[in-house]
């Protein structure tokens, strides 16, 4: 008994130190194997079909997962619509450009027909993000532990201070990630998600036209790249105009993002910030190896997918991902 008590005490201390990660221990592989054996197949096939028809969805579904996990943990709170009495997370400025909700709705409808009330929206988001990125490779790029339950709360006020912004400096980024139980390797690897997808000009136009309020350009930005961006994003910024976050390969999930960042061609200040810390700058150089990046990205996604998850009797399994039961 003494040995068992000592083991439990050690585990409890570790759970306190690793924010949210102890919950991830209650997630497992193939959680739905008996209760809904086709669950992961339905998610994968639907997601692959959608991404085949619209390759830009890969970045959108991956971003949806990020924005969910960094606010209240991976509980699908980002999917909830506002109500008469409460304004939800999706109404917050950083979330207004999120999309891919319709894909999650489609998958949820199919799963409710197959096995009602079994598969959580939170697990669908995590699986769809993995499968969207994996479509290019035709194999699963990382494991997704399942067993998450859905939250019942979504508040606009919770978004501020939890999501990194495009203008974040390195200490801010490191603090935000550390608060979620993620280390510097995770920070740099997960920033590599910017190797796919596009950004609205307004998210970085200040770097081009008014960096210090004097009509100047951010000196940390490669001048030729800055000139190119100015041809794509005139001043003032057109909210509808977008450019690729990775100047070399917007649709290909590769390590080109890190090559660009190392050449001072990171689109956001938060990308450039990775070079301002000696340790993260070294990781940026290491992740120019495609194999090194993809290996760490998978590990970091598993960690991120375990942030403050609801398991057991907590939360619920929503019938409709946009509203609580």
Image (cartoon, rainbow, N blue to C red):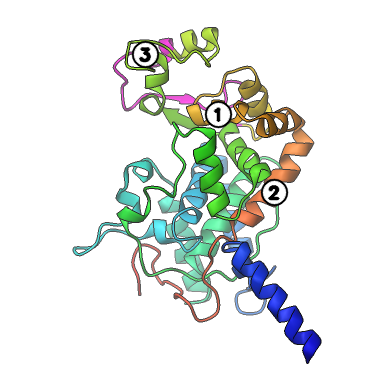
Image spot of residue 277 (x, y percent) = 63, 30
Q: In x, y percent, where is residue 195?
A: 60, 32
Quarter assignment of residue 166: top left
Q: Are marks 2 and 1 in contact (CB under 8 Å)?
A: no
Helix, strand or loop at label 1? It is: helix
Task: Note whether 190 is above or below 65 in the view shown.
Answer: above
Closer to the observer: label 1 or label 3? 1
Q: Tell me the quarter of the image containing the C terminus.
A: bottom left
Q: CA distance from mark 2 to mark 1?
A: 22 Å
Sequence-first tag of 1 and 3: 3
Nearer-N-terminus badge (3/2): 3
Quadrant of the image occupied by residue 6: bottom right
Residue visible at 31% across and 59% down in the picture: 81
Identify the residue at image location x=72%, y=74%.
Answer: 10
Query: What numbered label is drawn on residue 298?
Result: 2
Residue 301 seen in the current view:
yes
Viewer-nearest of discs 3 and 2:
3
Q: What residue sits right under mark 3 in the picture?
A: 209
Residue projecting furthest to the left:
84
- The dot on residue 297 is none
Identify the magenta region: 230-251
Residue 33 position in % (x across, y down): 67, 74
Q: 36 left or right of 76?
A: right
Residue for badge 1: 273
Vertical order, 156 against 40 (above or below):
above
């Amino acid at each position: 008994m003494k040995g068992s008590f000592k083991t439990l005490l050690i585990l409890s201390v570790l759970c306190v130190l690793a924010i949210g990660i102890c919950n991830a221990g209650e997630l497992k592989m193939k959680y739905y194997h008996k209760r809904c054996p086709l669950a992961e197949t339905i998610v994968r096939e639907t997601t692959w079909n959608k991404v085949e028809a619209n390759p830009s969805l890969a970045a959108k579904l991956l971003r949806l997962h990020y924005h969910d996990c960094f606010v209240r943990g991976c509980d699908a709170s980002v999917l909830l619509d506002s109500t008469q009495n409460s304004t939800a997370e999706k109404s917050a400025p950083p979330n207004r450009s999120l999309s891919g909700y319709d894909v999650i709705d489609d998958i949820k409808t199919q799963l409710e027909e197959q096995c009602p009330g079994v598969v959580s929206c939170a697990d669908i988001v995590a699986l769809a993000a993995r499968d969207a990125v994996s479509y290019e490779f035709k194999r699963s790029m990382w494991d997704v532990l399942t067993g998450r339950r859905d939250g019942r709360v979504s508040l606009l006020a919770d978004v501020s201070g939890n999501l990194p912004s495009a203008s974040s400096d390195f200490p801010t980024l490191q603090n935000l990630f550390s608060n979620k139980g993620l280390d510097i390797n995770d920070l740099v690897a997960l920033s590599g998600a910017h190797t796919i997808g596009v950004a609205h000009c307004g998210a970085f136009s200040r770097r081009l036209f008014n960096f210090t309020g004097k009509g100047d350009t951010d000196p940390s930005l490669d001048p030729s790249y800055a000139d190119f961006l100015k041809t794509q994003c005139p001043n003032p910024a057109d909210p509808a105009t977008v450019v690729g976050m990775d100047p070399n390969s917007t649709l290909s999930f590769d390590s080109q993002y890190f090559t660009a960042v190392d050449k001072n061609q990171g689109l956001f200040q938060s990308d450039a910030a990775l070079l301002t810390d000696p340790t993260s700058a070294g990781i940026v150089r290491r992740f120019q190896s495609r194999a090194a990046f993809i290996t760490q990205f998978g590990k970091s996604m598993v960690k991120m997918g375990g942030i403050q998850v609801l398991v057991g009797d907590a939360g619920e399994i929503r019938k409709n991902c946009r509203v609580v039961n």
